[in-house]
Amino acid sequence: MTVVGPFGLSVRDQALEADVQAGLAAVEEGLLEATKSEVPFITEAAQHLVRAGGKRFRPLLVMLAAQFGDPYAPGVVPSAVVVELTHLATLYHDDVMDEADVRRGVASANSRWGNSVAVLTGDFLFARASHILADLGPEAVRIQAEAFERLVTGQILETAGPRDGRDPVEHYLDVIGGKTGSLIAVAGRFGAMMSGADETVVDVLTQYGERLGVAFQLADDVLDIASDTRESGKTPGTDLREGIPTLPVLRLRERAERLGLPEDIALCELLDSDLSDDARHAEALAKLRVHPALEQARRDTVRYAEEARSALAPLPECDAKAALVELCDAVVHRAG
């Protein structure tokens, strides 16, 4: 058993490991090539997060999904580059909206060069992804466009908040289905589709990616509260400080409304206060880390990961399927 990709994913078959490693190496080269510009400053800014590393979760999913067809098909690696470029572009924009200082263990682009450069660099990456997509055919362009629409819609819904009478938790799950699930679903879909896999397999891996994507984001929500910078690569409690209602906070508010416990209500009031104050922010983080709401968010993560695992049932038993199942376990493990 060897280790490959993010989270120490173990692969039992040497041929599969070789395929995945070679594919991820080719994606890395493709990312560096796609982020080059004739303007040296643009290259520096565009490669800032590429060179910072990252889990490459989406390209890994493309490579594993491609195992159900021809993993060496010419569209597999470029489609993985497209998905990762799109993801990287959203990180530049997210950091501007969140006013984040750290991303992947390095200074965020907005803190280093300012918001305007960060936003425009994200736009540059979107443009490069579109350029690659044009060579993959109109169906790939349509799939990516639909996913990008869902991604942006999710971001807008997050900003607008739930409409009157809408359950905030249901609203949030819809938001992350768009913001995160949509692009990870595309990773599974592109890998299968570009490899020439059967349409049934393409559908299975799309549904798997959607559910795994939600679990992945919920794990991130837990990490934002529970981890330190070394584990997550970004400043703990960033979402908390910015007043972004991630799942642990929503579960806390739900519990406070249902049970009316004084300590829950007091913690909600603390979260509603000015958390730009470091001492207040640290107190809120410490209390959330030991609150039952965090454990509830972990259980939600497990539920979506189990749904992803169940979606794989129609696929034939093979090492690639076993690796996809292990990805579900790895996502849950991140959330503790």
Image: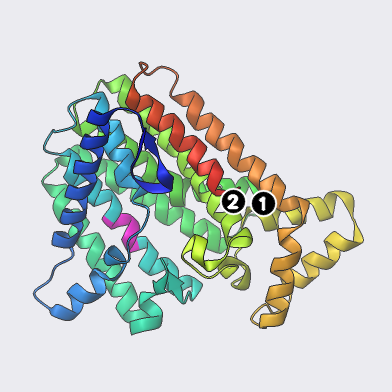
Label 1 CA crowd tier, 10 Å (few <14, some 14–19, many 20+):
some
Q: At which x and y percent is residue 313?
A: 45, 19
Q: Seen in the image, is 116 located left or right of residue 207?
A: left
Q: Residue 217 magenta-drawn?
A: no
Q: Which mark is residue 172?
A: 2
Look at label 1 and name its amino acid: Pro
> Element under label 2?
helix
**Quadrant of the frame with the N terminus:** top left
Number of residue marks: 2
Q: Quadrant of residue 199?
A: top left
Question: Which secondary structure class fits the magenta region best?
Answer: helix
Q: CA distance from mark 1 to mark 2?
A: 6 Å
Q: At which x and y percent is residue 134?
A: 13, 48
> In the image, what residue occupies the spot 71% across and 60% down?
289
Q: Quadrant of residue 228?
A: bottom right
> In the image, what residue occupies the spot 35% across and 76% down?
109
User: In this picture, which residue range is highlighted in magenta?
Assistant: 85-89
Could you say which is closer to the camera, residue 146 or residue 313? 313
Instruction: Find out whether the residues at labels 1 and 2 contact each other: C-beta distance under 8 Å.
Output: yes
Q: Seen in the image, is 334 located left or right of residue 56?
A: right
Q: At which x and y percent is residue 167?
A: 69, 47
Q: Residue 86 magenta-drawn?
A: yes
State the residue position of label 1: 168
Q: Seen in the image, is 19 located left or right of residue 336?
A: left
Q: Which mark is residue 72?
A: none
Q: At which x and y percent is residue 104?
A: 41, 65
> Element under label 1?
helix
Q: Would residue 276 be visible to someone looking at this image? A: yes
Label 2 CA crowd tier, 10 Å (few <14, some 14–19, many 20+):
many
**Colour setup of the view:** rainbow
